[in-house]
Amino acid sequence: MTKPLIYADFNNADPRGCLRLNCIGTIQDLARLGVRLQEGLKVSLHDEEMEAEGEVHYSGEERIWVAKIDWESIR
């Protein structure tokens, strides 16, 4: 299975550096691709200028899905 390529706002990170997956572009991509977020899902994340690989996790603190990325590997 290929990793879904979804939009993420790289300026919308939580204090731990995880990208919040709650912006409109992300929601639109998930709906268009028919992807349902689940714990441990591997995704490719992008915005207009950057791309990174990530792993989806649920943030119980914020009650939203986030993606853990390696900030050093952003392309």
Image (cartoon, helix red, strand yellow):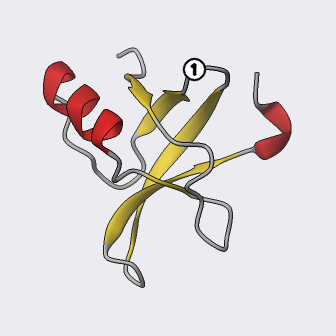
Disc 1 residue crowd, few under 14, some 14–19, many 20+, Cα 10 Å: few
Q: Residue at x 45, y 57 (%)?
A: 66
Which part of the image, by quadrant, shows the N terminus? Answer: top left
Image side of residue 39 versus residue 29, left or right: right
- In the displayed structure, 32 sits above or below 25; it is above
- In the displayed structure, 53 sits above or below 56; it is above
Q: Residue at x 39, y 50 (%)?
A: 21
Q: Please tell me which residue lies in front, 22 or 45.
A: 22
Q: Residue at x 39, y 42 (%)?
A: 41
Q: Residue at x 40, y 15 (%)?
A: 2
Kindly identify which residue carries mark 1. 48
- Tell me the kind of residue under disc 1: Glu
Image side of residue 5 versus residue 54, left or right: left
Residue extending farthest top: 2
- In the displayed structure, 36 sits above or below 73; it is below
Q: Residue 11 in the image: state x and y as whole percent.
A: 62, 50
Q: Secondary structure at mark 1?
A: loop
Residue 31 quadrant: top left
Q: Residue 57 in the image: state x and y as whole percent.
A: 43, 59
Q: Residue 61 in the image: state x and y as whole percent.
A: 42, 84
Residue 17 quadrant: bottom right
- In the displayed structure, 61 sits above or below 55; it is below
Which part of the image, by quadrant, shows the C terminus? Answer: top right
